[in-house]
Amino acid sequence: MSENMPMPQGPLPRIDPELRRAKLALAVQQEIVAGGRVESQTEFSAVVRFEASVNHVLHLLLTLITFGFWIIVWIALSISAASRRKTVMLTVDEYGQGVRQPL
């Protein structure tokens, strides 16, 4: 853009509700591709949760096979997975602006 070009004055134009829904659907799709899972969704907002999982059955077997030594690794992985859990809220306002808020 040119430096001499004036910025538009006044409020932003409101967008069509169908376009708002489409923008939200695209944002939700991007979060799902990144590993999220939709917990709830309304017309113009969604809550997405990210969780890192630990295969507890496998770690139990490894702990039994190694006579308890593997439990240190199991605990470390469980703590690490718990710290990577997060929840975000996606919203699209009436002007088409998308917002991603951590909860």
Image (tube, grey):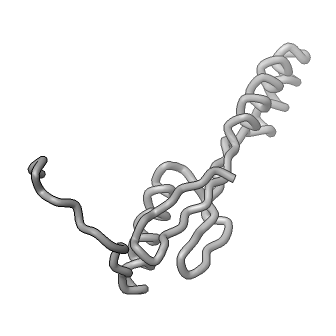
Q: Position of residue 30 (x, y in %)?
A: 44, 57
| Residue drawn at point x = 57 percent, y = 72 percent | 45
Quarter assignment of residue 54: top right
Q: x%, y% of residue 76?
A: 78, 23
Q: How many marks overall?
A: 0
Residue at x 55% of width, y 81% of height: 43
- Residue 27 appears left or right of 55: left
Q: Relative to 89, is 98 on the left or the right?
A: left
Q: Is 103 on the left or on the right of 33, as rendered?
A: right
Q: Position of residue 52 (x, y in %)?
A: 66, 41
Residue 48 location, quadrant: bottom right
Check the image and report above or below for 95 versus 63.
below
Please provide percent x and percent y for residue 58. Answer: 76, 34
Q: Residue at x 55, y 63 (%)?
A: 90
Q: Nearer the viewer, residue 66 or 44?
A: 44
| In the foreground, 6 or 28 | 6
Residue drawn at x 44%, y 79% is 21
